[in-house]
């Protein structure tokens, strides 16, 4: 099932995290997050929809 706002929601989370990393002076993290944002913008809609969710709580030990 496709979620129309998934890309926008993901992009907003990445932007927020990048701003916080920049505020904290974490230059490497800021760069990585900015690069992730570029990849989100460049990704085809199908790629974004098929991205796995990283839910660490559901993974077995």
Image (cartoon, rainbow, N blue to C red):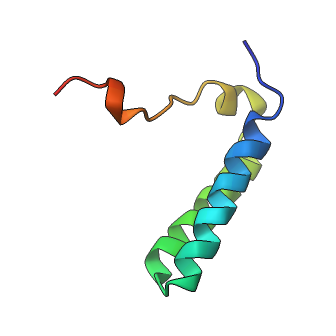
**In-image side of 55 versus 22 (left or right):** left
Q: Position of residue 40 (x, y in %)?
A: 69, 48
Q: Residue furthest top?
A: 1
Of all residues shown, which one is farthest toward the left?
A: 61
Q: Is residue 24 left or right of residue 46?
A: left
Q: Is residue 24 above or below residue 54?
A: below
Q: Position of residue 45 (x, y in %)?
A: 77, 31
Q: Residue at x 81, y 35 (%)?
A: 5
Residue appearing at x 68%, y 63% in the figure: 15
Seen from this angle, which residue lies furthest bottom? 25
The quadrant of the image that shows the N terminus is: top right
Count all numbered tags in the image, as a single digit.
Answer: 0
Q: Is residue 20 above or below residue 43?
A: below
Give the x, y percent position of residue 51. 57, 30
Q: In the image, is residue 43 above or below residue 1?
A: below
Image point (79%, 44%), residue name: 8
The part of the image, by quadrant, that contains residue 55 is top left
Identified at 71% across, 51% down, the residue is: 11
Quarter of the image for residue 14 reads bottom right
Quarter of the figure with the C terminus: top left
């Amino acid at each position: 099932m496709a979620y129309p706002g998934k890309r926008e929601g993901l992009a907003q989370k990445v932007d927020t995290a990048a701003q916080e990393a920049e505020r904290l002076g974490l230059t490497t993290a800021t760069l990585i997050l900015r690069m992730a944002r570029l990849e989100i913008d460049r990704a085809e809609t199908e790629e974004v929809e098929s991205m796995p969710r990283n839910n660490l709580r559901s993974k077995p030990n």
